[in-house]
């Protein structure tokens, strides 16, 4: 546990948590519901338009279908700025240059400084290459916020913000320089199958996140809901962001505790790093197709064991949210966080930031802390 590190802001010494995701899947356009007609309309993957203040904004947005009907909205937005900040690994610092000079190395302090691609440029670059139907690997991080709609009930939402997008071709990842590499996931290396119906298809859907525990609630089913806090970057103090996760109850090996039971025993202000998968999927079941037999059907009286019943796949519900599947060993720290770190200072917005693009699916060892603070995952 002594080797586990949490980033600390150098200025105000606040803790800053990290999150990441990695998805592989097929690109689809985001759908927006027309308020007048009620019909769903596909939106462009990339566009540029002015904001209410008149500044230009570039937006890259699309869905990645990681498995049949599991569609995750991904996005990246950037605006022009006054300055850019090339970085030097040698000097271990960034320097400020005029926005127009962000890619002009002659305007940098010396040759050790390199331009950092800004979201404004990245959105345009990726927007010119990504199209519906492509298979891609997307990496990025989560952004969280809370809004309070007209009914007054506070709700939590998240955004999946792009860091990189790489195409999948012939079962392998194509790097920016044209080289290729095989897909690695779940400790295995394999050629990725771009066909959801192929028996060899494997879903690549993974996230990792550091969280502080606000509360947990175990339902009658045994599933555990985790109300957590993500400490995000802030200029004056780290900003606490609410995030909701779910741990589904699964049968544990004899003599062992289930993951859902372990998370249910966590307390407020505990810290842990979790891993899992991101769900926004329709769920399916198979039902027997019952056919009306004609009165003169010669097979009507044939023994049932001689017949094959046709089955049909039907949607029977949905599965949404961040599903915790595992945790990083050694990351659990009891009462690491404080009440002050969980306090919010910003007012809630009253508008759902996703209203303009609604989801068409609606979208082990000895305990070092003593017996009173035992490790529920031991």
Image: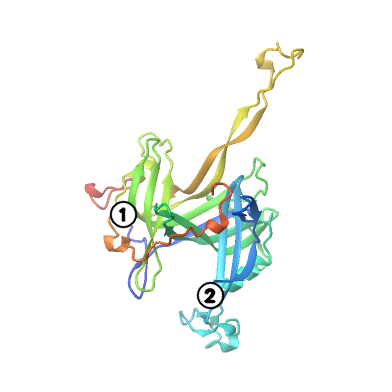
Q: Secondary structure at mark 1?
A: loop
Q: Quadrant of residue 145?
A: bottom left
Name the mark on residue 239.
none
Quadrant assignment for the C terminus: top left
Image coords of residue 19 (percent x, y): 45, 60
Q: Are marks 1 and 2 in contact (CB under 8 Å)?
A: no
The answer to whether 24 is drawn above or below residue 12 in the figure is above
Residue 65 x, y percent position in the rendering: 61, 50
Q: Is residue 257 left or right of residue 368?
A: right
Q: Of the residues under marks 1 and 2, which one precedes in the sequence?
A: 2
- Up the image or down, 84 lies above or below 33; here it is below
Q: Which mark is residue 53?
A: 2
299 on left or right of 66: right
Other residues around mark 2 within 10 Å, as few (<14) / some (14–19) / many (≥20): few
Q: Nearer the viewer, residue 114 or 309?
A: 309
Q: Residue at x 60, y 85 (%)?
A: 104
Q: Would you say residue 262 is visible in this rendering? A: no
Q: Position of residue 81 (x, y in %)?
A: 53, 79
The one nearer the camera, 124 or 271, is 124
Q: Quadrant of residue 336?
A: bottom left
Q: Is residue 63 visible?
A: yes
Residue hosting label 1: 270
Residue at 60% in and 61% down = 61
Tell me how many marks there are.
Answer: 2
| Residue at 70% across, 54% down | 170
- Binning the other alpha carbons within 10 Å of mark 1 as few (below 14), some (14 to 19) or many (20 upward) gives some
Residue placed most toward the observer, 202 or 104: 104
């Amino acid at each position: 546990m002594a080797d586990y590190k949490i980033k600390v802001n150098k200025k105000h010494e606040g803790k800053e948590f990290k999150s990441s995701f990695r998805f592989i899947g097929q690109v689809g356009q985001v759908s927006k519901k027309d308020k007048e007609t009620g019909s769903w309309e596909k939106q462009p993957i990339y566009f540029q338009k002015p904001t209410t203040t008149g500044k230009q904004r570039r937006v890259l947005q699309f869905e990645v279908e990681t498995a049949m009907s599991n569609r995750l909205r991904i996005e990246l937005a950037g605006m022009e700025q006054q300055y850019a900040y090339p970085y030097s690994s040698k000097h271990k610092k960034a320097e400020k240059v005029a926005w127009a000079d962000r890619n002009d190395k002659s305007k940098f302090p010396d040759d050790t400084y390199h331009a950092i691609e800004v979201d404004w440029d990245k959105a345009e670059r990726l927007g010119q290459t990504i199209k519906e139907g492509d298979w891609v690997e997307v990496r990025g991080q989560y952004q969280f916020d809370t809004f309070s709609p007209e009914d007054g009930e506070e709700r939590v939402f998240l955004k999946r913000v792009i860091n990189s997008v790489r195409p999948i071709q012939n079962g392998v990842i194509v790097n920016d320089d044209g080289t290729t590499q095989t897909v690695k996931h779940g400790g295995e290396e394999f050629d990725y199958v771009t066909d959801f119906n192929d028996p060899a298809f494997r879903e690549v859907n993974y996230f990792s996140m550091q969280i502080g525990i606000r509360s947990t609630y175990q339902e009658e089913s045994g599933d555990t809901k985790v109300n957590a806090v993500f400490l995000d970057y802030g200029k004056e103090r780290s900003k606490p962001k609410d995030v909701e996760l779910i741990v589904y109850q699964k049968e544990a090996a004899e003599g062992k505790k289930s993951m859902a039971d372990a998370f249910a025993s966590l307390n407020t202000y505990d810290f842990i790093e979790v891993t899992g998968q991101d769900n926004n999927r329709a769920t399916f079941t198979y039902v027997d197709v019952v056919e009306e037999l004609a009165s003169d059907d010669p097979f009507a009286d044939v023994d049932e064991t001689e017949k094959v019943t046709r089955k049909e796949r039907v949607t029977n519900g949905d599965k949404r949210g961040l599903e915790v599947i595992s945790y990083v060993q050694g990351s659990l720290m009891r009462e690491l966080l404080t009440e002050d770190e969980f306090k919010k200072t910003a007012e809630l917005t009253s508008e759902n930031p996703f209203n303009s693009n609604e989801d068409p699916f609606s979208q082990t060892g000895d305990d070092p802390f003593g017996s009173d603070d035992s490790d529920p995952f031991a």
